[in-house]
Image (spheres, coloured by chain):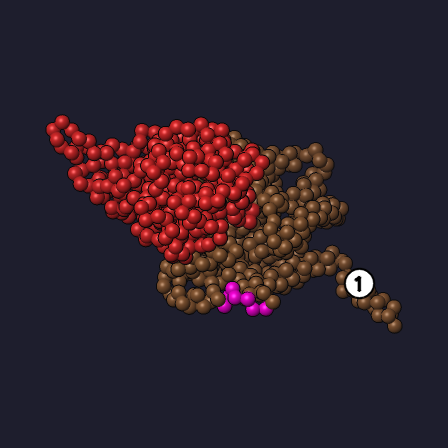
Chain colours: A brown, B red
Amino acid sequence: MALTLLVGIALRVVIGITLEYNNDVTAWTNTLANIESGNGLYNVAGYYYPPVWGYILASFSEVIGFLGIDQWSEIFTEILFVQDYNSEDAMVSTPVFNLALTVMYMFADLLGALAVYWLINHFTEDTVKAKIGFAVYFIGLNIILVGALGGMFDSFSALMTLLCIILLIKRNDFLSGVMFSMAVLLKLFPVFIFFIVVAYLLKKEGGFINRRLALWAAGAGLALLVLYLPQILEGNLMDSLSFITARAGNAEGTGNILLKYSSMLIYPVIAILEVFVAYRFLKRDTYDIDRTFVWFVLISLAVVFIYPSTPQYILLMMPFLIVAAFVHESRLTRPLLLLIIGGAIFQTSSLPFDLLSITMFWDAMSLDAWNSLYDLFYSPLLGGFNLMNIWSVVGAIPQYLSVLMTLWIILEHGGIDLRGKIRKAVGRETAAAE
Amino acid sequence: MPKGWNGEPMNLRQSFPAIAAVIIIAVVLAGEVITVTDSHSDFSSSISLQGDTVEFTIDSKGSHIYDAVSLRNTLGTPESVSVYYDPDYFSTSGDGHASTGARALDEGYYVEQIPDTLMVRGINHVETVDAEGLGRLMSSDGSGRAVIMISGSIPDTVYDGTSDSPILKWIRSGGRLYWAGDVLGKYLAHRDAAEEVGDGTALFLGSDCIDSEKRMGYSVSRDDFRDSLYILNNDISYAPDVSMIPSDTGFLAIGYTDGIRSSLTFVECGEGMVCIMGGDYSIRQRIDMGMMVASGIGPDTEIVETVHGTVSGKITGSIAAGDSVYITLGGFDSVYSENHEVVRCSSTTGDSSAGAWPSRSWSASP
C-alpha cells in the first residue's frame, strides 16, 4: 500500500503542478473571490452548483490563505482568441493554486480508496483483494485526471456516497443520512440511490415504521436544512438549483436542444427504473442482505449512466464497480478497465488547454508549438468535426461500453441468459427468412 | 489503544467510516460558516499624505497580491450611484452569455448584481430607478453623480432624440453615464416599443462612431491601466471608433482593443462624461464596470505610479502622490478594492502638504 500511495501521490503532484484544464478551475477562482469579498455563493453570478462544493471551497480558501498562495489566476492576451470558441478561456490558474487544489482532491481520493478497501475487506476478509481494490481506486488514471487535470470535484461525490452506504451497513443511520444529503447537495446524481437505500432499511427492519429509517431520514433532513439555511434566509434558494433548472430551461442550438429534451425525458425514466431495482432488491431472497445491497447500489448507479455522461460524473459508479469486481463478480474487471481507459482518454480531449500551464507559466512549451497544437485540435477535419470532437468520442465509446457491459454482466449474474436469448431470437429470424 | 465513546478499545479500521464522515462534515460546516461570515470588512486600507508621497496601509485576511495605483485627474468616487431598470419599458439589449447550468444573464439579473458588485469596491449606497425616477434624477444637476444604464435603449422620460434631452443636459452638467448593452443613443424606448434615432450616438459622442457589429479585442490598449486594474472583459462590441471622436473631445480608451475600439472608453461630454463598456452582458463586464465606477477614472485620468506586492496581514508602503489611490487585492480574482482620494489641505501656516483625507465618509472602510 505504501508503494501505491507513493505512486498515486507522485502522479497527482506532477500532473497538478504542470497540467490543468483551466476552464473549470478558473470558475472556482471566481467563486473563491466572490466568497472572500463577501458576496457568498449566489449574490453574484459565477457559482451554479448546490451549496456543498462552495462550502468546501470556502474552507479551502482559508487553507490557501494560510499557506500564502496569493495569486490564483492570470489572463494571457496571447491566447485571447480562444474565447471565441465555445466557452474556452484565456484565464489560466497558477501552478501553485492548481497544486493546492490537486492536494485537496487527493485527500478525497485517499479517503475514497480507504472506503473501497473497507468494503472489500468487510465482505471478503481478504486483505490482498482489499489492497488491490485500494490501488485500483487510488491510482486509477481516470480518477487522478478528473481531479488533478480537470479540477472537478466528483471524487468528493463518490466519497460521500461510499460513506453513506458503509455507515448504513454499520448501522450508523443518522450519519449515513447526513452523508446522503451532502452527496446530493454536492452534485445531485447520488439522489438516485434514495430508493435502494430505503429498500435496504425496509428489508433489514421490516415495514415503513422502523427506527433506523426514522434516524436516517432525520440525519438527511437535518443536513438538508442546515446546509440550505443560508439560502433559505437570503432568499436565493432557486439560484442554488440553477444546475438543474437552467439545464432544463436554457437551450440554444440543435445539440443543446436535443440534450435538453433527451435529459428531460430520460431522467424520469431512470427514476422509474430505480424504483424497479429497489423492488427487485426487496423481493430477492438472500442470506447476506448487506452484500446484496452493495450489489444493488452498483445496479442503481449503472442505470443512472445509461444516459451517457462526461468522465467526471461517472466517477460515482467507479468505486462500487471495483468493490463488486472483487466481492461479487470477477468479470466486472473488464468494464472497470474500459472505464479507466475511456475516462482517461475522454478527460484529455481538450489537450491544448491542459497544456496551458506549462506553456504560459513554465515556458516548457513554446507559444508557437501550443498554437500549432491548438490548430490541430480545433480545425475542422471530418464533416465539420475536429480532433477534439473525435478524441472525445474515442474516449466516450469505451466509457459508455463499460456501462453497457456492466449492465450485461449484472443481468447474466442474475441468471438471465442474454446470449441464449439473442441466439434464439437470431435463430428465429433466420428461420423466418428461410 | 485509544478508547471509544463506550469505553471499549477503539478499532481504527472499524471506526474509519465514522471518522471520515465527521472530517467531511467538519470541513463542509466550517466552509458554510466562512461563506456566511466572510465580508468586505475583512479587508481594509487607508492612506496618508507625506509631502510628495502617499503612505498606504492595507490589512488583508489571508494572502493576496495587491496593487496600489496612484491616479491623476480622476473624477473621484461618485457621491451617488443609480441604476436604471424598468421592466415596463422596452429594452433592446439581449441576454448575455451564461455558462452551462448557469442562471440566464438577463437585464433584471444583471441589475440585481450591481449593488453587490459595487459593495465589494467600497460603494454601499446604490439605488435602482425606473423610467420616471430617472426622469426626476436627470432633471437636477449631475455633478458628482453616476448613473448606470445597461438597457441598450434610453427611456422617453429622459431622451427625445435631440441635444436638449434631459439625459444630455444632465451629463453636460457633470453627470457620469456608465453605458452597456447596445449602441449608445440609437434607441429611444417607450413602454411598448423602441424607435431608432438617426445620429443618436453623435448627440453623446460628437460623431456616429458606434455600430452594432460584434467584435473582440485581442491586444491590450494601455498596458498600464490593464495591468494595474486587472481589466477582464475583451468584448468590444458597441464600443466607439475613437478615431471618429472629434479632436476637441477628450477621451481615454483602455482595456482590450482591436486597434480602433476598446473594451472601456471614457469620453468627455461637457462637464461630465460617458463611459462605454463594450460587449454583451457578462460577469467580466460587470466586474470591470464596478471597478470603473469606484475608481472614478475619467477621460483625462493618468496613472502616476503603481506599487505591486503581496499582503498577508498588515502592510504599509508609499507611492507618488496623485489625486487618488486605488487599492485592489486579488488581481484578476479581485476580493477587495477601495478608492482613496488625496486631499491637500491649505493651512493657515502655509504648509500645503499638511495632511490627507481618507476616502469618502460613506465608504465601507476608511
**Does the magenta-highlighted stretch encompass residue A243?**
no
Residue at 64% across, 34% down? A214
Q: Residue at x 11, y 28 (%)?
A: B349
- Give x and y (percent) for residue A403: 65, 58
- In the shown orientation, is residue B81 left or right of residue B5? left
Q: Is residue B294 above or below residue A317?
A: above
Q: Secondary structure at mark 1?
A: helix
Regarding residue B37, the answer to whether it shows in the image is: no
Q: Is residue A417 left or right of residue A242?
A: right
Q: Position of residue A105 (x, y in %)?
A: 47, 51
| Residue at mark 1 | A421
**Label 1: chain letter:** A
Instruction: Specify the segment rendered in magenta.
Output: A376-382
Measuring from the top left, give residue B281's x and y in whole percent.
49, 45
Q: Nearer the viewer, residue A88 or A170?
A: A88
| Quadrant housing the C terminus of chain A | bottom right
Hey, what amino acid is under mark 1?
Answer: Lys
Residue A181 picture quarter: top right
* Residue A412 left/right relative to B244: right
Check disc 1: other Cα within 10 Å, few if <14, some if 14-19, many if 20+. Answer: few
On screen, residue A207 versus residue B179, left or right, reads: right
Q: Position of residue A68 (x, y in %)?
A: 34, 47
User: Can residue A276 be seen?
Assistant: yes
Q: Specify the quadrant of the image occupied by residue A168.
A: top right
Q: Is residue B194 above or below residue A327?
A: above
Q: Please tell me whether residue B125 is drawn above or below residue A89 in the rendered image.
A: above
Q: Residue at x 33, y 45 (%)?
A: B249
Nearest the eye: A167 or B171: B171
The residue shown at (64%, 36%) is: A212
Q: Nearer the viewer, residue A185 or B29?
A: A185
